Amino acid sequence: MQSEYLIAIDEFCAKHDIEVSFISSLQQTGLIEITTVEEVGFIPVDQIQQLEKFMRFYYELDINLEGIETISYLLKRVTDLQEEITNLRNRLGLYE
Amino acid sequence: MAFIDYYKTLGIDKSASPKEVKDAYRKLARKYHPDLNPNNQDAKSSFQQINEANEVLSDPEKRKKYDQYGKDWQHADEFEKQKQQSQDSGSRGATFSGGSSPGDFSDFFESMFGGSRSSGRKQTKYRGEDYTTEIHLDLLDAFKTHKQTLLVNGTTIRITIPAGVENGQIIKVQGHGGPGENGGPNGDLYITFTVANHPTIKRLGNNLYSNVELDLYTAVLGGEITIDTLDGKVKLKVKPETQQGTKVNLKGKGFPVYKREGQFGDFQVTYLVKVPTNLTERQKALFEELKNSK
């Protein structure tokens, strides 16, 4: 069985001085996933980087949840398009 | 070391109120924040500049010092000595972390303010900055697993580049970014590979493609030719009556599959039949004979 590293939401929020409701809102909009073990909410470690990015959007840039959702979608599109450009450039190399 | 006009950086007047400083900064941060501009070095650089401007202008003590000595920054130390009892105010502007270490200030800033930002409201653990770098390889380099030494922000690291790395591929080397602060983890190193084209062999994914010239006689009568691959020379049997543009697939003679040892793509050869030139009278006569023999 593969083990998954988890961080308790309460602990994460206390360390970063943020509200638990912020994490819950992100989960409700589907931006992050939460694992519940014996009624305690945990954040998988592989989502921490993404979560910290959302925190910066929300607390530092004053962007609301709807804005974060939109930005996430657009950033995903940017990444996909950048990947597509690279693939197309590689294909173009065949004809140069 | 050039003077930096922090007011100009934030696009505000020298008489701007703290709220105006904050608003101007926030507006620009939303535009240039690295989280919103992935892989954009220009935006990163702009963000560092506005971050630095805000660090100074949002802190009353620093702003006062900057306003008084900004253009004569060389005298700032004398100013400091005269104010022996002065202390860092400890106030914290809303300087953004940008997902990285809050460092990266200009020489001008370091000279005036000593380089370190004012202490935070609490000892937040900062993950170290992610570093990015590029490695340029030619197709032959990317064909074989090899080690390479890199100098990243003054630190030498030795990495193994697996065979089969693609042009544009980004590899993350965990923990080789900037050091974390207050016990935070190190950032990561992201390496973007640029693989140059080979003069005669083209690559798409794991397959290789090459055009091979075939003389008319071999194309008509068949024979054996030797072609160059990235792994050395390979002998090929050419079937009689081979047509222009015929493709031959050499299974497993292509590029190594990334991180799958022993697996290779294919090598596709396209024959380009070359019509002879500068024929002798005798050769022309033979071709005529051939033509009339139909």
Image (cartoon, coloured by chain):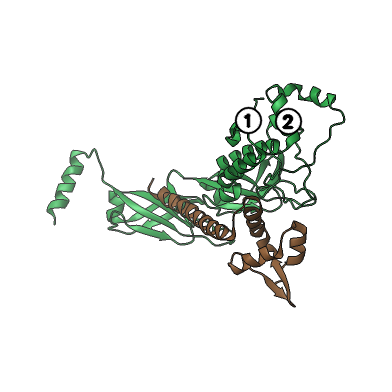
In the foreground, A19 or A8: A19
One can see residue B155 in this view: yes
Tint of chain A: brown
In the foreground, A83 or B200: A83
Instruction: Report the side of B230 relative to B117 (left or right).
Output: left
In the foreground, B260 or A5: A5
Residue A75 x/y as whole percent: 53, 55
Residue where numbered disc 1 is placed: B14
Tint of chain B: green
The numbered disc on residue B3 is: none
Determine the residue positioned at 15% across, 51% down.
Answer: B291
Residue where numbered disc 2 is placed: B64
Q: Residue furthest right?
A: B85
Question: Is there CB contact under 8 Å for labels 2 and 1?
Answer: no
Determine the residue positioned at 61% across, 45% down.
Answer: B26
Q: Chain of mark 2?
A: B
Q: Chain of mark 1?
A: B
Q: Amino acid at mark 1?
A: Lys
Q: CA distance from mark 2 to mark 1?
A: 11 Å
